[in-house]
Amino acid sequence: MRTLKTAILLTSGCAMLAACGGNGIFNRDRPDEFAVQRQAPLVVPPDFTLTPPAPGSPRPAEGTAQEQALDALFGGPAPRSQVETSALDRAGAAAPGIRSQVGDPATNTVAKGRVTRDIIAAPQGDGQAAQAVIPG
């Protein structure tokens, strides 16, 4: 046990001392990015007719920030495939007030009851002890 601790300490000490070396692939000599090209002087733009924006006015941009984010993430609208178009055609158009009907307390719903709750709460297993019971 004592030799293991000594070996670990010796190895970590050697690794720390090896990190102090300056030759090899970790050489820090790099070109200065500011010395590569001379910086151009700042110039006042010749157009002085620009007016500052009014406080609270929208920014002059193409679309809203949300539209720009969606275009950046998803690349804009894509054409639908034949399968998607067929599925949408078969589904038909939704009723205009469907969202308010779903949220209405008078909307009829199906109570799944204890059976569904028991199925969802059943412990996971390999199914070796599973049985199917047909009510008769």
Image (spheres, rainbow, N blue to C red):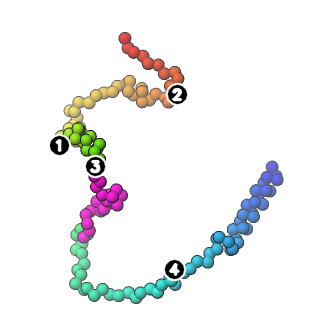
The three-letter amino acid code for the residue at tag 2 is Asp
* Quarter of the image where one finds residue 18: bottom right
Q: Earlier in the sequence, mark 1 or mark 3?
A: 3
Dot 2: element:
loop
Question: 129 above or below 107?
Answer: above
The residue where tag 4 is placed is 33
Separation of disc 2 and disc 1 at Cα? 46 Å
Dot 3: element:
loop
**Residue placed furthest toward the top:** 136
Q: Position of residue 84 (x, y in %)?
A: 28, 44
The three-letter amino acid code for the residue at tag 4 is Glu
Q: Earlier in the sequence, mark 4 or mark 1?
A: 4
Dot 4: element:
loop
Q: Which mark is residue 85?
A: none
Q: Earlier in the sequence, mark 3 or mark 4?
A: 4
The residue where tag 1 is placed is 96
Dot 1: element:
loop
Q: What segment carries the magenta color?
A: 60-80
Q: Residue at x 17, y 43 (%)?
A: 96
Quadrant in which the C terminus appears: top left
The residue where tag 2 is placed is 126
Q: Nearer the viewer, mark 4 or mark 1?
A: 4
Question: 109 above or below 76?
Answer: above
Q: Nearer the viewer, mark 2 or mark 1?
A: 2
Separation of disc 4 and disc 1 at Cα? 61 Å
The residue where tag 3 is placed is 80
